[in-house]
Amino acid sequence: NPALTQFGDRMSHLTGVRAIMKDIKETLQAGAGQEFINLSPGNPVILPEVEQLWRDCTKELLDSSEYGKVVCRYGDSQGYEPLIEAIATDFNRRYGLNLTNRNILITPGSQSLYFYAANAFGGYTTTGELKQIVLPLSPDYTGYGGVTLVPQALLAYKPTLDIDAAAHRFKYRPDFSQLEVNESTGCVLFSRPCNPTGNVLTDEEVRKIADLAANYDVPVLIDSAYGPPFPALNFTEMTPIFGDNIIHCMSLSKAGLPGERIGIAIGSESAIQVVESFQTNMCIHSSRYGQAIATRAIASGMLANISETVIRPYYQKKFDVVENTLEQAMPKDLPWFLHRGEGAIFAWLWLENLPMTDWELYQQLKKVGVIVVPGSSFFPGLREDWQHKNECIRISLTATDEDIEVGMQRLAKVVQEVYSVV
Ligand code: PLP
């Protein structure tokens, strides 16, 4: 095997949930014959209305004279011009902005956008200073653990917990007494709504973070992979927040197009130029077929419409099933806390003082045919020891109502047994 560089070594390992997905895949394969209730996927459900929209847009593209220009030619690194135009028009109208096409960049999925930004703004500067990639609230998206070539640049902060003990609910909040954004910060990054917790930072919390960062000209990347206007997977009111130092990041993956890899960045001209050059060097540009069909779905308003009328209610109802089943099945006297379901496609359960680790609980659940994701993989960049990291699990909302119900009932039973052993 050839010797690897630091970067080579770093990038040849899987981080966080990608590593666990391997175990899950093997479990599912080895257990052929055994019926598993799989509550682990982050892959969105194929909803018929959404699939139809993409079919219709594809047909329109195939029938148009544009087809050859889309697939038979290279394009601009910045993205397919009509798509950029459609996004600028839609956002200017919807949010009263003054975006020009120079404020927008299309990337092959939003994960690549975080990779560009994390390494353009975080890591070692030309003068050898280490610039941090700050995650203001941990837990957050596991994929952030793999985006930097300089792992010591990633720095996450422990949150405060708003606990409603009687209701068995809780919510994470940024801990502004601890959070530091200063001259050694390269960029700030968080998801809103959040994968894995379903948390939505309030408008006020977002503005406060953005203001802290603005003092040092630090870009703030707001990962809106689940945000409005598409896929609109927010179950609570939220306003997308824009600003000079904010890079608003979107993805069409949860709007039914994960395979086409489309990410969208909206930000200042100077920030967009930096990430655009990074992209040109890395892969020239995103695939144009996906961009062309997205243009039609966005310009017609259909994507925003389907997001609100089909995608959002579908997952919101699944969260209700999780909530109602846990309510009925979980013992009232145990310290279980479900995170407020404010968005995304997951539920997040915290079991305080769990007598085993989240990984061990995951193994126990496998024995009763239920697969969840152990929560400890969702704390990238958090350096402190914190027992809470081993007390949570992520439950996907992509299963059927019945599977969620049975899964939650089995979970409740296992949890009861686990606590009663001590
Ligand atoms: N950000 C969050 C919060 C996610 O949950 C995901 C995918 O699950 C991504 C980013 C990456 O999505 P993509 O690269 O498909 O746009």
Image: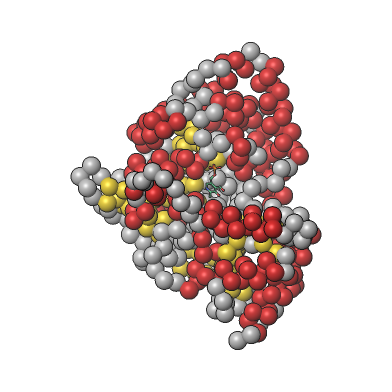
Please identify the quarter of the rendering in which residue 278 is found: top left
The number of callouts visible is: 0
User: Which residue is rendered at x = 72% and y = 29% of the image?
Assistant: 55
Give the residue drawn at x 37%, y 40%.
244
Towards the viewer: 240 or 374: 374
**Where does the image place residue 116, in percent across and percent down from the top left?**
40, 40
Q: Is residue 173 above or below residue 259?
A: below
> Where 422 sits versus 267, above or below?
below
Q: Residue furthest front?
A: 1
Viewer-closest of 296 and 363: 363
Residue 365 or residue 229, whichever sits in front: 365
Left or right of 119 on screen, residue 344: right
**Picture quadrant where residue 409 is located:** bottom right
Residue 115 rendering spot, x and y as whole percentages: 43, 43
| 382 to 97, vertically: above or below | below
The answer to whether residue 317 is visible is no
Query: In the rendered image, which quarter contains the N terminus?
Result: top left
Query: Measuring 75% from the left and 72% from the top, which residue is drawn there?
Result: 328
> In this view, which residue lies farthest toward the bottom?
422
Q: Is residue 97 left or right of residue 345?
A: left
Depth check: give the residue in front, 134 or 2.
2
Q: Is residue 124 visible?
A: yes
For the view shown, which residue lies furthest in the top direction?
65
Q: Where residue 183 appears, x then y in whole percent?
A: 26, 52
Give the quadrant of the C terminus: bottom right
Q: How is the image coloured?
A: secondary structure
Residue drawn at 55 percent across, 45 percent down: 225
Q: Residue furthest left?
A: 127
Tell me residue 4's x, y (percent): 36, 46
The relative height of residue 189 versus residue 175 in the rendered view (above or below) is: above
